[in-house]
Amino acid sequence: MEDSVFPSEAVASFMKDHVVESRLHTDLQGSLTDEQFSRNRKLQDEIADGSTANPYFVMVDAASGKPIMHFALSGYFPAWPDLWMKFLEASAKKIGRTI
């Protein structure tokens, strides 16, 4: 996603205007201490409703800190940009943003 979908013009433009990106890495312990990895896994369990899918995306309302929508990437690569844009747009609409 980071190399192919996020940089595309439509996605990058939408994310720039409507999304503050934050990442929680839970699949590669090698770059984290045991404490960091454990804390990330705990946060993953809380934020992602127990899902261990990777990648797994959660839109969080900045005002309330509560999850708005969840998205587990699936399917094959050609579908990803369209699926991601639909997720972004639905998330923005859910909190009342005009897109």
Image (tube, grey):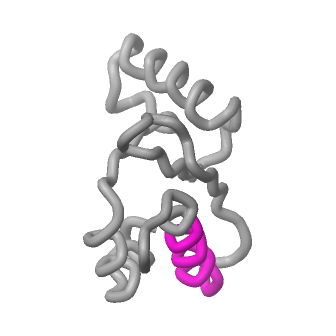
Q: Residue furthest left?
A: 16
Q: Is residue 31 above or below residue 60?
A: above
Q: Residue furthest right?
A: 75
In-front residue for pair 70/76: 70
In-front residue for pair 42/14: 14
Q: At 42% from the left edge and 76% from the top edge, which residue is drawn?
A: 98
Q: Is residue 25 left or right of residue 94?
A: left
- Residue 20 position within the rendered picture, expressed as x and y whole percent measured from the top left: 30, 54
By secondary structure, the bulk of the magenta-drawn segment is best described as helix
Q: Is residue 17 above or below residue 27?
A: below
Q: Is residue 91 left or right of residue 16?
A: right
Q: Is residue 34 above or below residue 75?
A: above
Q: At 34% from the left edge and 25% from the top edge, which residue is drawn?
A: 32
Quadrant showing the C terminus: bottom left
Q: Is residue 12 above or below residue 88?
A: below
Q: Quadrant of residue 19?
A: bottom left
- The verdict on residue 82 being magenta is yes
- Residue 16 position within the rendered picture, expressed as x and y whole percent measured from the top left: 26, 70
- Residue 73 position within the rendered picture, expressed as x and y whole percent measured from the top left: 64, 62
* Magenta-highlighted residues: 77-90
Q: At 36% from the left edge and 77% from the top edge, which residue is drawn?
A: 14
- Residue 79 position within the rendered picture, expressed as x and y whole percent measured from the top left: 64, 83
Q: How many labels sit on residues?
A: 0
